[in-house]
Every structure is written in structure tokens, then in C-alpha cells.
Image (spheres, helix red, strand yellow):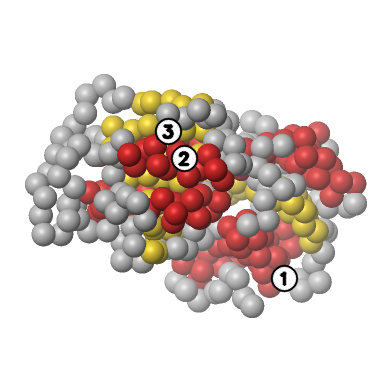
Amino acid sequence: MFDSAIRRRLLPGVLSCAMIALGAGGALAEELKMGLLVPGSVSEEGWNRIGYNALKGVEEQLGAKVSYVELQQNPASFEKAFRDYASQGYQVILGHGFEFQDAALDVAEDYPDTWFLISSSGIHEGKVIGLNTDTSQPFYLMGVIAARMGKKAGLVGGMEIPPIQEAFAGFKAGARSVNPDFPISEAYIGNFTDTTATKEAALSMIAQGADFVVPNASGATVGAYQAIAESGKDVRTFSIFSDFTEVAPNNILGLYVADYAQGVVEVVRNIREGNPPESNVVFGLKDPKVIRFDFRNDAPVTVPEDIRAEVTAVANDIAAGKIDTMPQ
């Protein structure tokens, strides 16, 4: 089984009927089983919890039997976990992060009846399908706010991989749409678990004059919020993926809310019914049930009304495809 991982199994109290006839469209003909691989603990707010919530959504809305495994950054363990689930008859397995993509491609060759969903990926090869939230879009809005209200920004990332690079590219594009000379520093800690490293990186940026610091480091993100909170209310930030206002109550101006669960539920529902995606799936501001940006009204410092109006107009233009949030 999962030798080096912490495994949890979630058994629904009463499984609703997930048995449907095998039709010409390739609908699943047996009890729906879905597995989840996450690169850390689901007990903390942030990226891993989002994956867990997606799994729970499939359990609750589709009556699936579900299970998850918490893994460290070890590619060999990724492949083993995929194989374990596939060999046990799990028809859908979600690897919650771009780092699971290569392992899924390797394992998929041996399990042609299994669907492999990969978060933060643009892939679509056979039954390996990327599910991507275009984080450059809400980050673009954050950049606009930072450039309007601040003097300098710092971005703290986990691993230097495309999903995080794209989010930060969106922030920089948004800021520089307002002020082409707005200074932005960027640092990566090289993992998604070291909260001390994110805290130190954020403190370093603040010491160098950053009054906006935005982290994006999965389970390690909270360390940066701790640094921001300790630095006083003049340092501002935004809550990423989950609600971190309890960690930095005086600093968060807005929240990037990702109800990834609803997007995953719809994809899995379509797979079960024999209508799988024909390309990789991208959620953006055009999908308000899945991804949105909310202003916060109960902080010591809030976004002024004129800037809110500007950001709302920009968000509408992004949703309509009028603004490229990652210009070359």
C-alpha cells in the first residue's frame, strides 16, 4: 500500500447511486471511486486543503467512494501512489499539483481505463487531463491594487514551476499596467512545506521596503502571512486560495477565492456520464462559481472606492477576454 505516506480513507455514510449503464459515450458502469494525491497535509488552510475539498465535493455530490494520500516532494512516491489507486480500480485520480504530471503520464500507459486529472496543468494526452485555474487573472487584479496603493511589492513563491510563475507574471502585468516602473522583487524557497523559509523571505522583502507582500507557496504560504502580520498594518497583502484573515487580520485587503471543488465536481460528473473534456480545462474570472476576487471591508485599511471601481472594471474586461493577463 502507501508505505511512506500518510493515508486517509473517507467512507460516505450512505453512498448515493453511482451505478449507471455503460453507454456509447463511455459512461462509467460501476461504483465511482476517486483518489487524491496531495503534496503535503490537508489539515492546513491553503493549496492542499483545496484539493481535499474537491475530493469531498465529489463524494458528497456524486456519491463517490473516495480516498486520499499525503505525499512529500518525492516523484517516486507519486508514481507508486498513482499505481496503487489505479490497481485498486479507482476510475478517477486527481494529482493536486503540476508536479504530479510526469508520474501520471508514466502510469497512464499501464491503466488505459483510468482518468488522471492534474491540477495546475495544461496537459491533455489521452486520459491525462490538466485542470487549471488561471491564477494570473486574480493576481493581475492584486497587482493593480498594489501599484495604486503601495510603493514596492514582494512575491514569495514555493517551487519555481509554471503555475506559480504564471500567477506572479499576472501580478507584475497588472501592477505595470498602472505604473511601468513599479518595483517588484521575487523569491522562491524551493519547496512547498518550509514555513520558516517563506517567513524569512517575506521579512527580507519587508526590510527592503516592500509594503505589499504576496505569497504563493502551498502549505508554506502561512509563514509569509505570519511575517506580514508581525510587521504591522502598513504591510498589505491578499489572501490566496483560502481565507488567511485569522493569521493576518490587519493586513489582508482582499481574497482570491477558489472554489476549485465545484469545477472538479463538474469535470468528474462529465467523465462519469461519458462526456469527458476534449481539451485541458481552464477556469478563470469568467467562471465566478469557481474563481473570483473579493474585497475585504473589515480591515484597518481597505481598498478605496475609486480603486475598487477600477479593479471591478478590469476584472470584467479580463472575464470578457479583453485583457491579456500574461502579455509577452
Q: Is residue 1 left or right of residue 19?
A: right
Q: Is residue 230 left or right of residue 307?
A: right
Q: Secondary structure at mark 1?
A: helix
Q: Are marks 2 and 3 in contact (CB under 8 Å)?
A: no
Q: Which image quarter holds the N terminus?
A: top left
Of the two numbered discs 1 and 3 on the same chain, state the one appearing first in sequence.
Answer: 3
Q: Secondary structure at mark 3?
A: strand
Residue at left offset 80%, top offset 67%:
182
Residue 67 visible, this angle: yes
Q: Is residue 87 left or right of residue 196?
A: left
Residue 247: percent from the left, percent from the top?
67, 32
Q: CA distance from mark 2 to mark 3?
A: 13 Å
**Looking at the picture, does residue 57 appear above or below residue 278?**
above
Q: Are marks 2 and 1 in contact (CB under 8 Å)?
A: no
Which of discs 2 and 1 lies nearer the camera? The answer is: 2
Residue 261: percent from the left, percent from the top?
40, 44
Residue type at numbered disc 1:
Arg
Which of discs 1 and 3 lies nearer the camera? The answer is: 3
Q: Residues within 10 Å of mark 3 (few under 14, many from 20)?
A: many
Residue type at numbered disc 3:
Tyr
Q: Which image quarter holds the C terminus?
A: bottom right
Disc 2: which residue: 80
Identify the residue at the far front of this view: 110
* Quarter-of-image position of residue 242: top right
Disc 1: which residue: 176
Of the two numbered discs 2 and 3 on the same chain, state the one appearing first in sequence.
Answer: 3
* Quarter-of-image position of residue 124: bottom left
